[in-house]
Amino acid sequence: MAAAAGLALLSLAACNRAPPPAPKTYQVTIANMAYGPTPSGLRTGDVIEWVNNDIFQHTATAKDGSFDVDLPPQAHARTVLKAPGVVAFYCRYHPGMTGKLVVAG
Ligand SMILES: [Cu+2]
């Protein structure tokens, strides 16, 4: 009896908790030797879709090593944001190309 009541309370508590927001996909476009603006409001689990619209090969390489994506001309590639924090990234071929992702938990 008491166990059943406890179980009912537990499931009620689970229902009242707000579900985590569904992951979103954001595009970051590369053109003219530069990354486009990085999106704000990023959360853990969201996806960055890198789109290289340039005529050159680029990469999106995290300074902390959390991702390293090769992007031939016209390529698309996806990175899942696995942890909160600020991740600076750059292009391995053109170190002057830089950007920053700010990811909330
Ligand atoms: Cu590059």
Image (spheres, rainbow, N blue to C red):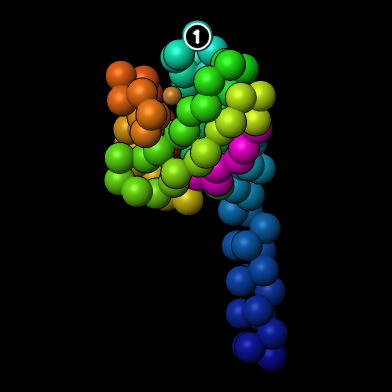
- Decide which of 86, 69 is in the foreground and name it: 69
Q: Is residue 31 above or below residue 69?
A: above
64 with respect to 19 (left or right): left
Judged from the image, the secondary structure of the residue bearing numbered disc 1 is loop
x then y, percent, for residue 7 = 65, 79
Q: Residues within 10 Å of mark 1 (few under 14, many from 20)?
A: few
- Decide which of 102, 74 is in the foreground and name it: 74
Quarter of image, res 72: top right
x then y, percent, for residue 20 = 59, 47
Image point (54%, 12%), residue name: 31
Queried whether the magenta region covers residue 79, the answer comes back as yes
101 with respect to 29 (left or right): left
Image point (34%, 48%), residue name: 65
Q: Is residue 81 above or below residue 52?
A: below
- Decide which of 22, 77 is in the foreground and name it: 77
Provide the residue span drawn in magenta: 76-81
Image point (63%, 71%), residue name: 9
Q: Is residue 42 above or below residue 81?
A: above
Image point (66%, 43%), residue name: 22
Q: Is residue 19 visible?
A: yes
Quarter of image, res 1: bottom right
Within the displayed image, which quadrant is ligand 1 positioned in? Answer: top left
43 with respect to 85 (left or right): right
Q: Main secondary structure of the magenta part?
A: strand
Residue at numbered disc 1: 32
Name which residue type carries label 1.
Asn
x then y, percent, for residue 19 = 63, 49
> How many labels sit on residues?
1
Q: Is residue 29 visible?
A: no
Queried whether the magenta region covers residue 12, the answer comes back as no
